[in-house]
Amino acid sequence: MNKQDIQNSINQGENEQAEFKTSFSKEVIESLVAFSNTKGGIVLIGVNDSKKIVGVNISDESIANWINEIKQNTVPQIIPDVELFELDQKTIVVFKIIEYPIKPVSYKNKYFKRTANSNHLLNVEEISNEHLKTINSSWDFYPDTSHSIETISVEKIKSFIHKIEQRTQNTIELPPLDFLSKLEMIRNNQLTFGAYLLFAKEYCSISDVQIGRFKSDITIIDSLTLSTDLFTETDAIIAFIKKHLMVEYIITGEPQHIERFDYPLDAIREIVINMIVHRDYRDSSASIIKIFDDRIEFYNPGKLIGGITIENLLSNNYTSQARNKLIAKAFKEVGMIERYGSGIRRILNICEEYGIIRPKIEEVFNGFRILLFKEKLINTDVVKDVVKNVVDNVTDVTDNVTDVVDNVVDKVVDKVVEKVADKVAEKVVDKLSNNQKHILLLMSQNQYISSRELALKVGISQRKTQENIRKLIKMMILTRVGAAKGGYWEILNDTKK
């Protein structure tokens, strides 16, 4: 780095990769640890939070002592690069650290991660996830010491293999358990958490799912509890939801009518699979699905991982990270997942194509929730067609409507004019719009001019022209003599003056 680089960093202020300190302290080490656990960064000592260069006093031993303190209090030990710069005749010390390959790094048994312009203290789950990412693994690959291989069903494994054979058109010769070993679902003759969840023989203690059909927020009319293997749960959840959907039959002229559910089944299936695959099974909470009259709520334990936000999901601006890599791989093997990380985008597209409003996606209660609504989108093309038809029809009947309106107006205005004509003041004319003045000018030149001709010459719609004429009549500036057809316009004498 050179002086210009440092000055640019100061001008930009503190951010995801830059921190300012006025002196060396434990906060400096915390920031270096936080940078090590993210994308690396620099700590400038001798600059305050307001980006003012205040400088720092150092001795010959200062840098060596600081480096030694950083080494002794971090695990794994980190050693930053150090440079000294003179800016505004003041000394600045710059510590630079790269992203550490083995994560997470700790300072006195505390783990920090850089988020925006501050250091975030990691909780136990985040520490675990950082470690798993470092070794390119996930929780479901780890041995399940509470369950033996005898607790999984060989028949379910065979069914899993058969689905793979159907998808790939290849025959798998390996015995069921050997095949799981090949996929690392069994490691060193020890069942993994993922294998237990995928092929549990009977009751599965960590896959609890609660589903209910609600008539109100507190009234349940049907419910289902599931605690079994993940493939069975997926099919059972979708079947229960489908049972409680409304369906309409679309007549096409063919012998077989088309069924249309109030929610797209493809979106429901995609949401359910995402729930099963990405759930945090280390959390004791259950997955919960609530079916209401106007929406379906899907709640799953476990927030987004890898620093991904809801905004990233909706904008499709993220790199997917599977919480359960083994489970995701199993679902992909049987064709239930097409491509990693595309589920949310596919759900949104399905709903849009189906003509219902966009689902609501949010993080709540230390988990992730999707709200699927049955409310239909407004079809703008249809609205445009309806408006066009209305406009066309209005244009067709304008003359007839004008005749009726003019006749009624004539009778009313005649009576009104007799009573209040004397009260019309010249100030009224000053309040006329340019369009109204233009209409009066054209009428003074041609008393028999039609509203359609007026509209063309003034440059406004016929409806607007008629509105202005009615206003002029109401203001006792204009009157109509005779019938709508054959009659003529008369501008009152006072107004002409």
Image (cartoon, rainbow, N blue to C red):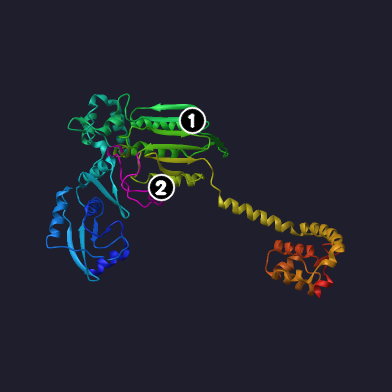
Horizontal and vertical percent position of residue 194: 27, 34
Q: Is residue 2 above or below residue 20?
A: below
Q: Is residue 394 above or below residue 363?
A: below
Task: Residue 98: name its quadrant.
Answer: bottom left
Distance CA(mark 2)–CA(mark 1): 27 Å
Residue range highlighted in magenta: 302-327
Q: Type of residue at label 2?
A: Arg
Q: In x, y percent, where is residue 11?
A: 31, 66
Residue at 79% from the left image edge and 62% from the top image edge:
474
For label 2, the SS is: helix
Question: What is the crowding at mark 2: few (fewer than 14 residues within 10 Å), some, or many (at least 20)?
Answer: few
Give yes or no for residue 125 being in the magenta stretch: no
Q: What amino acid does circle 1 point to? A: Arg
Q: Secondary structure at mark 1?
A: strand
Query: Which numbered dot is residue 297?
Result: none
Residue 324 in percent (x, y) is at: 29, 39
Q: Nearer the viewer, residue 23 or 342?
A: 23
The numbered mark, 2 or 1, whose residue comes first in the sequence reads 1
Which is more toward the observer, 116 or 263? 116
Of residue 257 and residue 468, the one placed in the foreground of this image is 468
Give the labeled residue for mark 2: 345
- Residue 309 inside the magenta-drawn segment: yes
Q: Is residue 15 left or right of residue 388?
A: left
Image quadrant containing the N terminus: bottom left
In this rendering, is residue 263 above or below 118? above
Q: Which mark is residue 213?
A: 1
**Are there few (<14), some (14-19), or many (20+) residues within 10 Å of tag 1?**
many
Q: Is residue 331 left or right of residue 214?
A: left
